[in-house]
Image: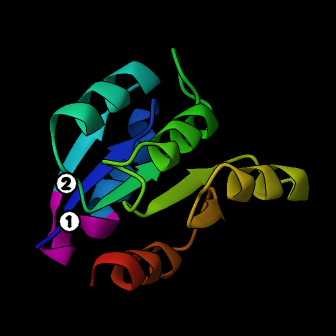
Amino acid sequence: MAKILIADDSQTDIKFIESVLNKSGHDLFFAKDGEETEKMVKSDRFDLIILDVVMPKKNGFQLCREFKKDERTKNIPIIVLTSKSQESDKLWGTKQGADAYITKPCAPIELISLVKKFVG
């Protein structure tokens, strides 16, 4: 059973992700903004992080870059899940260290398959 942190400021998106992953058997944790995400990652060990890009206090690209530069967190897979669908956004997400980049709205099977790829 993996510990998955889901960081998104939209309650609608959180509920969607939770409903999709609820039956996965993994422990799901939630953060509503960039600062809360950063605090949680520094104080706990997660097996996977799902990050929205547009969040208050710190955006997902900043967090991704910081987590991938930190020795303690650089090996945690990060899925960027965002409504930013331009190719330039996807490229920027990959440059920041994202292991996967999917756009909202996403098909539940797409999210499930990525989670399985990274944590089983």
Q: Is residue 33 found left or right of 31 in the rendered image?
A: right
> Circle 1 — which element?
helix
Examine the image and state in which quarter residue 11 appears.
top left
Name the one closer to the observer, 41 or 104.
Answer: 41
Where the N terminus falls, by quadrant?
bottom left
Residue at image mark 2: 28
Depth check, front residue: 85 or 5: 5
Question: Left or right of 53: which side holds 34?
Answer: left
Q: Callout 2 environment at 10 Å: few (<14), some (14 to 19), or many (20+)? A: some
Residues tagged 2 and 1 counted as in contact (Cβ below 8 A): yes
Q: Amino acid at mark 1?
A: Asn
Which residue position holds label 1? Answer: 22
Give residue 97's position: percent from left, percent from top: 61, 55
What segment is highlighted magenta in the picture? 20-27
Which percent across, then down, holds residue 90?
77, 57
Residue at image position (62%, 31%) is 54
Amino acid carrying mark 2 in the image: Leu
Q: Using the image, determine if residue 37 lies above or below residue 109.
A: above
Estimate how packed mark 1 is, as few (under 14), some (14 to 19) or many (20 or more) residues with alpha carbons within 10 Å.
Answer: few
Q: Residue at x 55, y 73 (%)?
A: 107
User: Residue 4: percent from the left, percent from the top?
Assistant: 25, 57
Residue 117: image quadrant is bottom left
Instruction: Kindly identify the residue that appears in the image at 42 percent across and 24 percent down.
Output: 33
